[in-house]
Image (cartoon, rainbow, N blue to C red):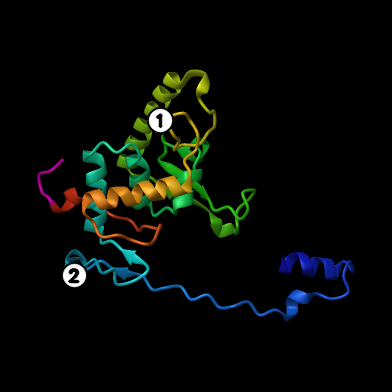
Amino acid sequence: MSSALSYAYKTRKIGHDPSKHVEPPRVTRPKPLVWTVERVERWRRTGHVPGPVMVWTAQQAGEFLDYCEESGERLYPLFHLTMTRGLRRGDGRRMEWPDLDLEVGTLSVVELADGSGPKTDAGVRTIDLDEENVRLLKAWRAKQSRERLRAGESWVASEVVFTRRNGEPLRDEFASQRFEVLVRRAGLPPIRSTTFGTVRRRSVWRPGRT
C-alpha cells in the first residue's frame, strides 16, 4: 500500500502521501527454545510447554522421520524433504515437478509474495538434494503415477509434487494437522514452528541400523 500511495503521489494522482505519516507497530517474535532433555522430562510429567515456539533437536527430528517411515506414512517424503532441506511449510506444498532436477539433485524454491512472483531476489534459491531426498522423490513420483492411473477421469491434473490421492494439491492446514497427529503418535514433544533446520536420521545414533 505504501508503494502504491507513493507512486500515486509522484504521478500527481493524489495531493499527498498519507503513508509517510504512519508508524507501523513493532512485531516482537518469540524466541525459539530447544527441547532439552530436562524440558522433555518435565513435559512428560506435567504437559508443560515452556514457550510458544519450540525446536526439536536433530535426534528428536530423526526419531519423527523414523516413525513416519516405519509406520508407512504416505506423506513421509514431504516431511523428510522439509526437515532435511530446511523448507518452509508452503515451500513443500507449492513445489512443482519442474522445480526439481532429480538427475542433478537440485530444488528451485521461489518464495511468493502474492502468488505471482518472488518477494525479493533472496526469495529465489536453489537447494542441493542428497541421495536420500532424490530416492524418496523418485519413489513418490512413481507412486503418484500409480494413483493417477487408479483415479482415471477423476484425477485432478497439475504439476504439484505433493498431492492427495486424486491429484488435488495438499492444503496447508491438512499437512499441519497431519504433522501434529504424527507427533502425538510418535510420543514426541510438540513444536510451534513450521521451519526446520537440517537434521540427521536417528540411525546416525544407532550403529548398525540401515
Q: Which stretch appears magenta?
A: 206-210
Question: Does the magenta portion include 204?
Answer: no
Dots 2, 1 in contact, CB < 8 A: no
Can residue 70 be seen in the rendering of this structure? yes
Residue at the location (33% across, 56% down)? 198
Q: Amino acid at mark 1?
A: Arg
Residue at the location (29% across, 55% down)? 199
Q: Amino acid at mark 2?
A: Arg
- The spot of residue 38 in percent (x, y) is 17, 71
Residue 172 is labelled as none
Residue at the location (34% across, 31% down)? 139
Can residue 201 be seen in the rendering of this structure? no
**Quarter holding the N terminus?**
bottom right
Spatial CA distance of label 2 from label 1 is 42 Å
**Quarter holding the C terminus?**
top left
Count residues near mark 1 (Cα–Cα under 10 Å), then give few for <14, some for 14-19, many for 20+. Answer: some
Circle 2 residue: 42
The answer to which quarter of the image holds residue 190 is bottom left
- The spot of residue 47 in percent (x, y) is 24, 66
Q: In the image, is 126 to the left or to the right of 137? A: right
The answer to which quarter of the image holds residue 10 is bottom right
Count residues near mark 2 (Cα–Cα under 10 Å), then give few for <14, some for 14-19, many for 20+. Answer: few
Circle 1 residue: 141
Helix, strand or loop under label 2: helix
Q: In the image, is 27 to the left or to the right of 132? A: right
- The spot of residue 32 in percent (x, y) is 36, 70
> Sequence order check: which comes first, mark 2 or mark 1?
2
Question: Does the magenta portion include 208?
Answer: yes
Q: Main secondary structure of the magenta part?
A: loop
